[in-house]
Amino acid sequence: MSQSFYFIGGVTGGVGRALAERLSGSGATVAGYARTAEDLSDLGVAKVFEADACDSAAVAGVFKEAQDSFGTPVGYAHCIGSVFLKPLHTMKDEEWTEVIATNLTTAFHGLRAAVTAMRRQKTGSVVLVSSVAARFGLPSHEAIAAAKGGVEGLVRAASASYANFGIRVNGVAPGLVETSATKHILGSEQARKMSASMHPLGRIGNPAEVASLMAWLLSDDASWVSGQVWSIDGGMGGIMPKPRAG
């Protein structure tokens, strides 16, 4: 069994695919799970398990299957989430519940399964995905901000709980990244330009950029890094852009 096995939740999404390709390209064994299994062997993914990330038993089950096939993962990345924009006063209860379940509860399930497995080997690294919306006030982002704020809380608390087991827990907080989940936001050229202009570096991010940071956090190069959430947002959450001419 490989000594460098990585498991990815949401491996069929934009960031999940980019991360899988990057990790497998470095010689690691990579597998993952998604709501619908796909053949990602062209990206170097050994197997995609099928599981509903909102179902804790299903997530625990695919972790066990993955361990039986490839060994205990040295790293787990949780790339599952959604983008939901709606003002708080117009939001239905079921919409709120779905956003929290998709973005926060799934992270809890994945993190719990990962640290349960990694505790036995007394080493491991986990990376969760937050959002610039959790740390920078944006209109109509109340639900996603609350969910991703919860993800950041998980990062900090779990990193403290499992440090004695040699397990590192970190997060990344992207700005707007072009994936299938953001198509509804970037549906027109005007929307794309407006979204790009909100980022001081003047453009939308791409999955490979987020995957690069996540791969580093999973690696031994980040062996003294834990309990941190790293912004990767084109400067959006930290700096004020100069007005653009014209």
Image (cartoon, rainbow, N blue to C red):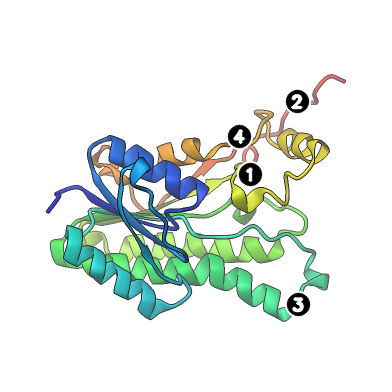
Q: Which residue is rendered at x = 60% and y = 42% of the image? A: 177
- Tell whether label 3 touches label 4 (CB within 8 Å): no
Residue 235 horizontal side relative to residue 215, left or right: right
Q: Secondary structure at mark 3?
A: loop
Q: First in sequence, mark 2 or 4: give its number.
A: 4
Mark 2 lies on residue:
242
Query: Residue 159, position in %: x, y?
Result: 34, 60
- Alpha carbon distance from label 2 to label 4: 14 Å
Q: Which residue is rendered at x = 71% and y = 53% of the image? A: 137
Which amino acid, by three-letter code, is at mark 1? Leu
Q: Nearer the viewer, mark 1 or mark 4?
A: 1
Mark 2 closeness class: few <14, some 14–19, many ≥20 residues within 10 Å: few
- Tell whether label 4 touches label 2 (CB within 8 Å): no
Is residue 56 at all visible to an observer of this figure? yes
Q: Which mark is residue 234?
A: 4
Mark 3 lies on residue:
92
Q: Nearer the viewer, mark 1 or mark 2?
A: 1
Q: First in sequence, mark 1 or 2: give its number.
A: 1
Mark 1 lies on residue:
176
Mark 4 closeness class: few <14, some 14–19, many ≥20 residues within 10 Å: many
Query: Residue 202, position in %: x, y?
Result: 69, 29
- The N terminus lies in quadrant: bottom left
- Residue lying furthest right in this view? 246
Q: Secondary structure at mark 2?
A: loop
